[in-house]
Image (tube, rainbow, N blue to C red):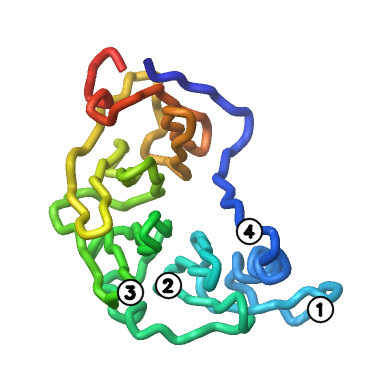
């Protein structure tokens, strides 16, 4: 059963980062989230002006990856500086809407038309995998669940979830789930996707939509 919770204000997803990197990340949240270059010093925090719109950030132990409307930026947490990674310049679509690291430290990029909608960067091999079979408008969010990766998408006035089998040596498109009840409106305005305790939660600008599941095969069950 799909449940919907409406909110009296907009809902936006929040990404939790490792606390020891708070100094750098706070600087990004205050400065990089805007296209305006801020010259004023704020306490003793570092500032990193950017000329692009920041869409989302994700980090591992070494780097912060920043999805923007002009591609992906890489920031070294140890050095406290931006770094040049040649593989990031090879992505085919610069309109990056969402980013996510999977358990194999591959970086998933969700983009918008025109161009590729999903590309996956393997930093160990410097290879980029593209998913070409998607005839949708844009990818809004990713969520990891064991050896599965889910992507929330927008297509016209509709939205839904895509399922990939995600393993160390292969990424395989499995299915697309547009099966949501009439009361799960605003799927074209998805801003986040999370999975925890066998529950998938879709975050829209107006509501939370969730369903319980044990196996991904159940997502197309009309009773789910």
Answer left or right for 122 relative to 189: left
Whichever of labels 2 and 1 marks the residue nearer the N terminus, that label is 1
Give neighbour class at mark 4: few <14, some 14-19, many 20+ (Cα, 10 Å). few
Label 2 vs label 1: CA separation? 26 Å
Q: Which marked residue is nearer to the observer: mark 2 or mark 1?
A: 2
Say whether marks 4 and 2 touch (CB < 8 Å). no
Badges 2 and 1: C-beta atoms under 8 Å apart? no
Circle number at residue 72:
2
Question: Which image quarter holds the C terminus?
Answer: top left
Q: Nearer the viewer, mark 3 or mark 1?
A: 3
- Which residue in the protein does label 3 denote? 124
Could you say which quadrant of the image residue 123 lies in? bottom left
> Which residue is outermost to the top?
223
Q: Residue drawn 41% across and 33% down?
A: 186
Q: Position of residue 182 (x, y in %)?
A: 34, 19
Q: Earlier in the sequence, mark 3 or mark 1?
A: 1
């Amino acid at each position: 059963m799909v449940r919907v919770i409406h909110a009296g204000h907009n809902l936006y997803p929040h990404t939790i980062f490792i606390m020891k990197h708070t100094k750098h990340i706070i600087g990004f949240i205050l400065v990089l989230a805007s296209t305006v270059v801020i010259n004023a010093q704020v306490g003793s925090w570092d500032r990193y002006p950017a000329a692009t719109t920041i869409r989302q950030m994700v980090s591992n132990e070494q780097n912060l990856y920043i999805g923007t409307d002009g591609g992906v930026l890489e920031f070294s947490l140890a050095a406290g500086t931006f770094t040049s990674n040649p593989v990031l310049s090879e992505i085919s679509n610069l309109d990056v809407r969402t980013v996510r690291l999977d358990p194999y430290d591959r970086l998933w990029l969700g983009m918008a038309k025109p161009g590729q909608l999903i590309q996956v960067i393997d930093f160990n091999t410097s290879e980029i995998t593209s998913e070409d079979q998607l005839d949708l408008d844009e990818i809004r969010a990713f969520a990891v669940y064991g050896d599965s990766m889910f992507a929330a998408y927008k297509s016209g006035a509709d939205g839904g979830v895509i399922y990939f089998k995600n393993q160390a040596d292969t990424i395989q498109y499995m299915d697309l789930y547009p099966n949501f009840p009439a009361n799960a409106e605003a799927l074209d305005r998805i801003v986040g996707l999370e999975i925890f305790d066998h529950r998938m939660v879709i975050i829209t600008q107006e509501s939370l939509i969730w369903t319980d599941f044990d196996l991904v095969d159940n997502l197309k069950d009309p009773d789910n």
